[in-house]
Image (cartoon, rainbow, N blue to C red):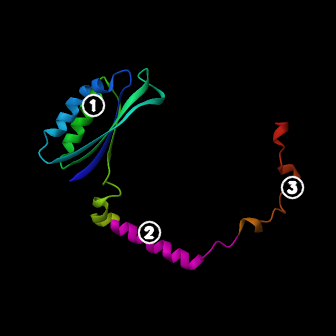
């Protein structure tokens, strides 16, 4: 089963209970799935860094979801975009790049091993860096190259 994390931003002008009722159809879509695991976290109402659809604050909801059906996630995303009270949605597949699926993906495991062996060879060949920052010579720099910032 794939693990997803969904972050929803709902209009801050609504009460939290009203915001939950507006996204209730999205939650019910997940609950129709036979094999699922859902954790809901409410971060509360927060001010936004910039206006989104003329809203300055939003209710933050985070859903952690495990499911085998990718169509469910696409439908969840589609319905949330159609919902007027949802300002933003972010769906992240947690396992795609770094999780369990990456550890059993033969191509990713082989690439990681190749990168690690190349790194070990380079480290053995070159060791530490040869030039330290205080050993850099500045003899070739003329005074014309030094530009006074205050004069600009």
Q: Which of 142 and 101 is in front in this view?
A: 101
Q: Which mark is residue 80?
A: 1
Q: In which quarter of the image is the C terminus?
A: top right
The tag earlier along the polypeptide, 3 or 1, is 1
According to the picture, the residue beneath numbered tag 2 turns out to be 115
The tag earlier along the polypeptide, 3 or 2, is 2
Whether 113 is among the magenta residues is yes
The tag earlier along the polypeptide, 2 or 1, is 1
Kindly report which numbered mark, 2 or 1, lies closer to the viewer in this rendering. Answer: 1
Q: Report which quarter residue 16 is drawn in.
A: top left
Q: Give the range drawn in magenta.
A: 109-131
Answer yes or no: do the residues labelled 2 and 1 have beta carbons within 8 Å? no
Residue 89 falls left or right of residue 67 = right
Label 3 Cα neighbours within 10 Å, binned few <14 / some 14-19 / many ≥20: few
Predominant secondary structure, magenta span: helix
Q: Which of 78 and 94 is in front in this view?
A: 94
Kindly report which numbered mark, 3 or 2, lies closer to the viewer in this rendering. Answer: 2
Kindly report which numbered mark, 3 or 1, lies closer to the viewer in this rendering. Answer: 1
Q: How many numbered dots are placed on residues in this image? A: 3
Residue 83 in the image, given as x and y percentages of width and height: 27, 25
Which element carries disc 1, helix, strand or loop? helix
According to the picture, the residue beneath numbered tag 3 turns out to be 142
Which element carries disc 2, helix, strand or loop? helix
Q: Report which quarter residue 56 is drawn in.
A: top left
Residue 84 in the image, given as x and y percentages of width and height: 30, 22
Which element carries disc 3, helix, strand or loop? loop
Q: Going 28% across and 23% down the picture, which residue do you hit?
A: 18
**Does residue 14 lie above or below 109 as drawn?**
above
Q: Gap in Å between the C-alphas at discs 3 and 1?
A: 62 Å
Q: Going 41% across and 71% down the picture, which residue do you hit?
A: 114
Residue 127 in the image, given as x and y percentages of width and height: 59, 77
Whether 80 is among the magenta residues is no
């Amino acid at each position: 089963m794939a693990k997803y994390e969904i972050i929803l931003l709902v209009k801050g002008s609504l009460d939290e209970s009203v915001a939950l009722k507006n996204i209730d159809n999205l939650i019910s879509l997940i609950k129709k799935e036979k094999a699922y695991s859902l954790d809901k976290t409410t971060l509360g109402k927060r001010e936004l860094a910039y206006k989104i659809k003329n809203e300055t604050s939003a209710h933050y909801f985070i859903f952690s979801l495990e499911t085998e059906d990718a169509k469910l996630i696409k439908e969840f995303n589609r319905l949330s975009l159609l919902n007027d009270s949802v300002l933003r949605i972010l769906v992240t597949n947690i396992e795609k790049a770094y999780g369990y699926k990456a550890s059993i993906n033969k191509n990713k495991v082989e690439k990681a091993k190749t990168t690690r062996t190349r790194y070990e060879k380079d480290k053995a060949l070159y060791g530490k860096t040869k030039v330290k920052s205080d050993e850099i010579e500045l003899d070739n720099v003329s005074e014309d190259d030094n530009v006074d910032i205050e004069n600009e």
